[in-house]
Amino acid sequence: MIDLGRKAGFGLTARNRAERRFQWVGRFAIGISLSFLLVMVGDIMITASGTIKRTEIALAVDLGPDRIDPADPQSASYGGLVKASLRDMFPNVTKRAEKKRLYNLVSPEAVFEVARIVAEDPGLLGGKRQIWVSASDDLDLYLRGKIDTDQPQKRRRISDAEIEWIDALQDADRLRRVLNWKFLTGGDSREPEIAGILSALVGSALSLAVCLAISFPLGIGAAIYLEEFAPANRLSDLIEVNINNLAAVPSIVFGLLGLAIFLGVMGLPRSSPLVGGMVLALMTLPTIIIAARAALKSVPPSFKEAALALGASPVQAVFHHSVPVAMPGMLTGAIVGMAQALGETAPLLMIGMVAFIVDIPTSILEPATALPVQIFLWADSPERAFTEKTAAAIIVLLIFLVSMNLVAILLRRKLETRF
Amino acid sequence: MDDPIITARDVSIFYGDKQAIFDVDMDILPNKVTAFIGPSGCGKSTFLRAINRMNDLIPICRMDGELRIGGQDIYAPEVDVVALRVQVGMVFQKPNPFPKSIFENVAYGLRIHKLATSRSELEDRVEWSLKSAGLWDEVADRLDQSGNSLSGGQQQRLCIARAIAVEPKVILMDEPASALDPIATAVVEELIDNLRKKYTIIIVTHSMQQAARISQRTAFFHLGNLVEFGDTKTIFTNPADERTQNYITGRIG
């Protein structure tokens, strides 16, 4: 008699329980990882949101002929002009120390901003003009409620007098919040209110371009040779073991190598994306070779066999059939390597890409810094406002990474062959 | 009787220390279908792959003796294996079209050997090959589709078209119908019979009925030895060796 309802004897109950238990363990693990990710990204986003806008102050700057010589506007003392306009707004500030505090309401950059505006539009000369300049980071933080005014004066970045002035400015409608394009279009600065990410972004892009140009052809070429042509002997085995080991070598070692060889022996320019890219290429090569070899290994041998039986030479068989089929896998390996390289700080520190770079590099020979190094530098800065900059820079780095992966996925889709 | 196109003398093949083929002598006649039969592991595929030197791909594989095609020793050092394989085409057990279009599959051999000087010549030869393989009517309107979009039997005929596009003298077939259903097998067998007029065909098969149906000559291999070789009729009706007798009647195998 067949009894499908029978459970006893097969251990069915226990087996089903084990099945369900494992599924729940898996779901729990995924849930935990997802929530960690959400917390991390969420926290970074919230912190970075402070960077979206920045504060400007409207100054009434006296551009009269007795202050600026209309024949030679660049010779004027713009620092004096900015200070004078602040003093005019708060005439009862007289003590030297207090004056100094008053001047600190605007960013040190304000002087240059006024000079630039005047240079661009000389028609402004001749009288008092209202000019919007960058406010200091502390003012910005206070406006956004990031400074705890319940704390005693000595323990906060902004004094009671300053708070009074800021409130007065606000009442007079002399403060405004604008979109912070400077962050995306400017270089680094010691002043958080005007520090931008572009120089690091360009530095990273240039380094990665160099890295890709070196490591992709070298890595793919080495992988094809090792996988398809190299004789199976001791030397090949030795090379394979070494490549696998190199993939696990701490990246700072590659930085040391770059310092010794590229800078020391070859005398290439220090801090340049060229050297940075070369060091990153060294680091990426093993990853690319290993991934490309795995991709080649997974190509069904029947394609190559068919081509060889048709009289294709080994090089033709490999390049016409194995390589195109393996290309998507090779690209994935290259992108994984590039993503690693993008996030790498240690080797870049060794070759001097840790410098304070204000100018946006225009070639691979100019000094530059990279995104992760910039994040490291900002995270190390004492000013409160740099915390937000750091978070924003992390987001820029993540966006860079995601768009790189997106390109890789699209390329793969395009190249994928079904068989 | 014609002169043999392929002559094997004392051919022994080794995989490392293991000998797979023992001192085989064989004369293969042109424009005939020669079938290699025998139980699994008897060395018939190994011997077949020696004829276009596909065994070269296996590093531990080594051959002794002499294999001549059209009087030339194919293992002589001056022989270019590429030139040999243009003359000796091969069709594999599992259909293995390239992951490219039907047209490109057939055109590939013509392209690498520069056998067509113009696009129209290339198209003509592709059409001729597909017609010879009896596939043209089925694929004429979809040459740009992937070779993998065809059915198994069609894929195998595509592989045959690919092999004959470069006009070899000999076509080696390694169990070409073993992955096909009976109807597709019948189509491929009929095709093989047609191709015999132009090509010398050597086919490895597990099916004795297939060997009896399509071949004129049959070689029976057993444990690496060529036991018996002769006209198919004789082998199947009046085998000289007891082992052949046992195999074709199903007592060993």
Image (cartoon, coloured by chain):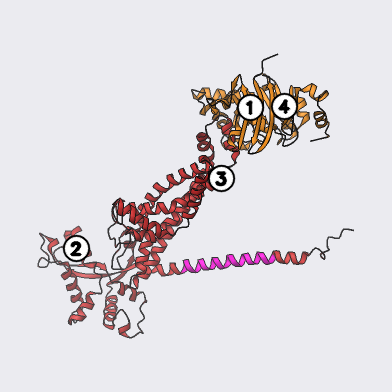
Image coordinates for residue A55, horizontal then vertical, percent? 31, 69
Hue used for the chain lettered A: red
Q: Earlier in the sequence, mark 1 or mark 4?
A: 4
What is the residue that sits farthest to the front in this orientation?
A: B17
Q: Which residues are magenta?
A: A20-42
Chain for disc number 3: A
- What residue lies at 37% left-to-right and 51% top-to-bottom? A278
Check disc 2 and report its element: helix, strand or loop: helix
| A39 inside magenta stretch | yes
Residue A316 in sight here: yes
Q: Kindly identify which numbered label has been placed on residue A115.
A: 2
Tell which tag, 2 or 1, sits nearer the viewer.
1
Nearer-the-camera pick, B243 or B98: B243
Q: What is the chain letter for disc 4?
A: B
* Residue A412 visible in the picture: no
Give the residue pinned by disc 3: A297
Question: In the image, which is nearer the foreground, mark 3 or mark 2?
Answer: 3
The numbered dot on residue B35 is 4
Task: Give the image quarter of residue B24.
Answer: top right
Amino acid type of the residue tagged 4 in the rendering? Ala
How many marks can you see?
A: 4
Q: Residue furthest top?
A: B1
Q: Is residue A36 left or right of residue A64?
A: right
